[in-house]
Amino acid sequence: MERVDIEKIIAGVEARRIILNCLLDGRKTGSEIRWALADSFDRRIDGVSDTLLYFNLQHLENCEIISRTKEWKLKYSEIHPSKIQSIRRFFHKIVPITIIGGIDDDITVIRSLRSRLRVEKSMTPPEKYFFIGPETLRRKIAGLFPDVKLLYAKEEIYKNPAELRDFIKLEMLDPEIMNNEVIIDVSSGSRVCSLALLSLAYEYGLRCIYLDENEKLTWLIE
């Protein structure tokens, strides 16, 4: 499981710690980050130099922890989706949990998983569940729960691990992980789907679970 060494990247520089903690709440302009630094250092806003701000933003960008984009006259900084859970872990920041997993035509797995995770002591109950399946299941599954959302991929995508991985990343993982901790579930779905999900779990540093037919929960990645 890939774990980003945040302490090494910060390298004892308090400004970098402040910036990352600030960006955990979402993307920020340079002005907003400057105010966060001023507040943390108990300085006036003009006491935070351009050098202090931009040198440390550049360092974090060079380490591929954050990205910076310009929109009109404003420049925004935000944490890369694939690094955000490692940074949350570093700062001990707790956010709601979302489960992302695969599904086939046996929806009893979803019911069993929801029921089991409600009593799991190692985590708070998930807020949402997202499941990915092939387009052929679209009209075969109904009667699910309000906190469960299904997403379908075309057959040619669903059968290709690399394409399915990118599809899940774009449509499910990247949007969801900015606000919630994502836990990967490989209890159901095809082998291709499980491979795609496991690949994302390693890339993003995510926990991963498996629920067997006896409702025994195993943490594949913790």
Image (cartoon, rainbow, N blue to C red):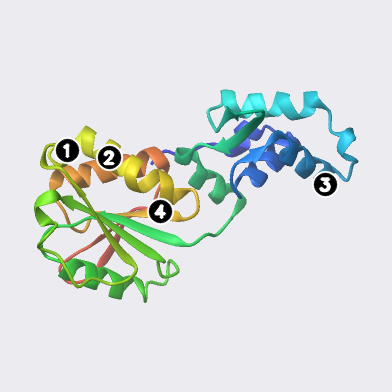
Residue for point 29% across, 61% down: 149
Q: Amino acid at mark 4?
A: Val
Q: Amino acid at mark 3?
A: Asp
Q: Is residue 147 visible?
A: yes
Asked which quadrant contains residue 141, the reply is bottom left
Judging by the rendered image, the residue that carries numbered circle 4 is 182
Which is nearer the eye, 201 or 220? 201
Judging by the rendered image, the residue that carries numbered circle 3 is 39
Upstream in the sequence, badge 4 or badge 1? 1
Element on which disc 1 rests:
helix
In this rendering, position of residue 28 left or right of residue 45 = left
Whole-percent x and y of residue 89?
A: 54, 50
Name the image quarter holding the N terminus.
top left
Q: Amino acid at mark 1?
A: Ile
Which is nearer the eye, 11 or 62? 62
Determine whether label 3 and label 4 are within 8 Å by CB.
no
Instruction: Kindly identify which numbered label has been placed on residue 157.
Output: 1
Mark closer to the observer (3, 2): 2
Mark closer to the observer (4, 1): 1
Report, in whole angstroms, how far the alpha carbon at label 1 lies from the one at label 3: 48 Å
In this rendering, position of residue 123 left or right of residue 34 = left
Upstream in the sequence, badge 1 or badge 3? 3
Upstream in the sequence, badge 2 or badge 4? 2
Instruction: Kindly identify which numbered label has been placed on residue 167.
Output: 2
Query: Outermost residue, front direction?
Result: 72
Element on which disc 2 rests:
helix
Q: Residues within 10 Å of mark 2 (few under 14, many from 20)?
A: some
